[in-house]
Amino acid sequence: NQVLALKKLSEWSKNSITTAKDIINSIDDEVRNLESNQALDLINSEVKVGFISTSIPIIIFTTAALITVYAILQRKRRKSKIVEIEPNLLEVMRKRSAIATLDTKTRKTKARKKSR
């Protein structure tokens, strides 16, 4: 009798576990459906900015585009300032680089003569 009772209890617990899993899965499905519906409602909803009524994705895209254009213009402005170097300063920089290359060449030739 005890063995039969344990078998029935085991079957009942297995059935209750599968039923609980099914219930949890159905609740998860309902929550996903509800979340997706809410997300779609949020995306499709219109926002009124001043006298303009538009959707949220359009506002986000427009803002991102404006920020990108502003960043590009700022970068171009910075580059144009860098290019504006005085001619005298440019000559001094060229002379220094020429002297530096001559120094490295003379060092290399001196090192070669010492190694021989």
Image (tube, rainbow, N blue to C red):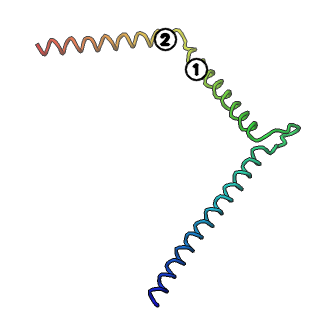
Looking at the rendered structure, the kind of residue marked 2 is Leu
Q: Residue at x 58, y 20 (%)?
A: 79
Q: Residue at x 85, y 39 (%)?
A: 53
Residue occupying the point 35% across, 11% down:
99
Residue 26 vs residue 52: left or right?
A: left
Vertical side of 86 occupied by 68: above or below: below
**Quarter of the figure that contains the C terminus:** top left
Dot 1 amino acid type: Lys
* Image location of residue 54, percent across then percent down: 82, 38
Q: Which mark is residue 79?
A: 1
The quadrant in which residue 113 appears is: top left
* In this rendering, the label closer to the viewer, 2 or 1: 1
Splitting the image into 4 quarters, where does residue 29 fall? Answer: bottom right
Query: Is 83 or 73 nearer to us in this picture?
Result: 73
Give the residue at the far left of this rendering. 116
- What's the mark number on residue 105? none
| Residue 97 left/right relative to 108 | right
Which of the 4 image quadrants contains residue 92? top left
Query: Which structural element holds mark 2?
Result: helix
Residue that label 2 marks: 90
Residue 78: x and y, percent?
A: 60, 23
Residue 100 to residue 66: above or below? above
Q: Position of residue 96 (x, y in %)?
A: 39, 13
From mark 2 to mark 1, how far is it between C-alphas? 17 Å
Q: Nearer the viewer, residue 75 or 95?
A: 75
Residue furthest out toward the bottom:
1
Q: Give how far across and how far down residue 94 sits, in percent.
A: 43, 10
Front position in the image: 12 or 102: 12
